[in-house]
């Protein structure tokens, strides 16, 4: 059987046929640098071809739009005489969740964003950091004991903070 010239990478993924696992890959591509999913190519690069009629392409496009909220480029290409569905995803300006998870592409795998990375990416879109965001609570409703407790707990990570100084807490 013929094989493709490249291998899977951070921006290329092969699938023998469409499964919902492909939505995870597309989400990870959108949250990283973008990428291309080739349906009709086995993981080892063997080109097996796939069903590529208009109805199947429309079904895939609808699944992607409804589950991910993105509009990729989808086309059928012929590779060594076999139809392969090529789905290209650009990097998304925001985050694209799938199944309640936020994924990114690392090498040939999809990994969950860490909580810190997720917070950084969300706040990075606004150009602010979490400590620059104001609270909706008026200052007089803030519990001074809770602030002092927080300052004591944060002391190891914020050595410059003096928990006994009310101005700093």
Image (cartoon, helix red, strand yellow):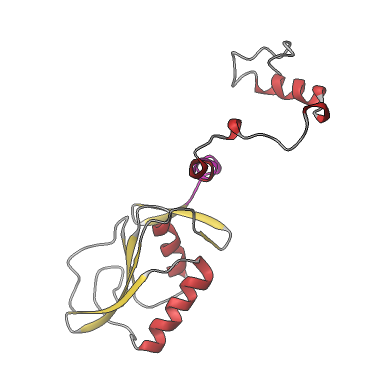
Q: Position of residue 43 (x, y in %)?
A: 31, 68
Residue for point 40% across, 85% down:
56
Q: Is residue 166 left or right of residue 157?
A: right
Residue for point 56% across, 43% down:
115
Q: Is residue 15 above or below residue 7?
A: below
Viewport quadrant of the C terminus: top right
Q: Position of residue 123 (x, y in %)?
A: 53, 41
The dominant secondary structure in magenta is helix
Task: State which quadrant residue 51 falls in.
Answer: bottom left
**What span is colored magenta in the figure?**
112-121
Residue for point 20% across, 63% down:
6
Residue in the foreground of this view, choosing between 129 and 102: 129
Q: Position of residue 45 (x, y in %)?
A: 24, 69
Number of marks in picture: 0
Q: Position of residue 161 (x, y in %)?
A: 63, 15
Residue for point 32% across, 83% down:
50
Q: Is residue 148 above or below residue 111?
A: above
Q: Is residue 119 magenta?
A: yes
Q: Is residue 58 magenta?
A: no
Q: Is residue 40 left or right of residue 64?
A: left
Task: State which quadrant residue 89 falls in.
Answer: bottom left
Task: State which quadrant residue 145 falls in.
Answer: top right
Q: Is residue 73 left or right of residue 125?
A: left
Viewport quadrant of the N terminus: bottom left
């Amino acid at each position: 059987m013929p094989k493709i010239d490249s291998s899977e990478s951070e921006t290329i993924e092969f699938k023998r046929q469409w499964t919902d696992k492909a939505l995870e890959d597309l989400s990870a591509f959108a949250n990283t640098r973008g990428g291309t999913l080739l349906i009709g190519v086995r993981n080892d690069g063997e080109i097996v071809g796939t069903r590529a009629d208009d109805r199947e392409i429309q079904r895939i496009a609808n699944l992607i739009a409804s589950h991910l909220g993105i509009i990729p480029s989808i086309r059928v290409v012929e590779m060594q005489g076999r139809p392969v569905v090529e789905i290209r995803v650009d990097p998304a300006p925001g985050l694209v969740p799938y199944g309640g998870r936020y994924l990114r592409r690392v090498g040939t795998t999809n990994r969950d964003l860490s909580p810190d990375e997720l917070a950084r990416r969300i706040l990075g879109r606004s150009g602010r950091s979490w400590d620059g965001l104001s609270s909706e609570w008026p200052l007089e409703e803030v519990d001074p004991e809770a602030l002092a407790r927080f300052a004591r707990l944060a002391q190891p990570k914020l050595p410059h903070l003096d928990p006994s100084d009310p101005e700093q807490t």
